[in-house]
Amino acid sequence: MGSKAVFLDRDGTINFDPDYLKNPDEVVILPTVGEALAKLKISGYKLIVISNQSGVARGIMTVEDVEAVNERINELLFGYNVQIEQFYFCPHHPDFSPTGTPECRKPSPEMLYRAVNDHDIVLDGSYMIGDTHMDIGCGNNAGIPAILVRTGKGASQEEVIKNSGLKVAYTADNLLDAVNFILKEVHEEK
Ligand SMILES: [Mg+2]
Ligand SMILES: [Zn+2]
């Protein structure tokens, strides 16, 4: 019997997104995020980051830069008694998929499926949360509810997403609002 998970976008959802964040010293966790993640953990959800990091393919940053930022995020979350179980990221360029390997960049659900395998996760009852249409698409493609947060690029994506045919389960002001939606839904199902 696996456990449920909340799959989270990183930049603009967990941390402030200055575009191509590569310096761990510049990591700033967004308001309500620590509290929101701790609430999910206490409720038994695994916390998995699913992130597009095309800055690697663009030569703006290295895989090591991405990993240093990931480590810094968990360092900061330590203060809230919560950790991201694993950070998955796609280093590829949006304009060309690498030959011979399956495309992992969101909205592809491939990274999410990898996490399901690695961590014995059940998709039924799991959620995807992010601030762009790619995150919503990823959740839709994996067949799980997708929540848009208005942090990061979220507020400016709302209209585009509404007109795109993507399915948004809920639009939240911030991560805590998103988490409260999830926990309320679970409660009402009982
Ligand atoms: Mg984002
Ligand atoms: Zn990829």
Image (spheres, grey):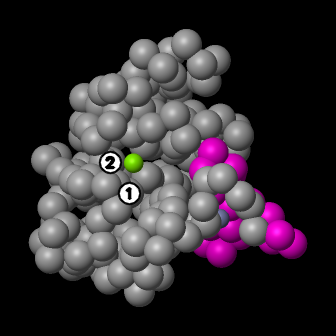
Stretch in magenta: 99-123
Quadrant in the rendering for residue 121: bottom right
Element on which disc 2 rests: loop
x then y, percent, for residue 175: 28, 42
x then y, percent, for residue 65: 36, 81
- Contact (Cβ within 8 Å) of mark 1 with mark 2: yes
Note whether ligand 1 is within 8 Å of mark 2.
Answer: yes
Q: Residue furthest right?
A: 100
Q: Can the viewer see residue 97?
A: yes
Note whether ligand 1 is within 8 Å of mark 1.
Answer: yes
Badge 2 is on which residue? 13
Q: Can the viewer see residue 89?
A: no
The amino acid type found where label 2 is placed reads: Thr
Quadrant in the rendering for residue 136: top right
Badge 1 is on which residue? 10
Quadrant in the rendering for residue 117: bottom right
The CA distance from mark 1 to mark 2 is 5 Å
Kindly identify the residue that appears in the image at 66 percent across and 53 percent down: 95
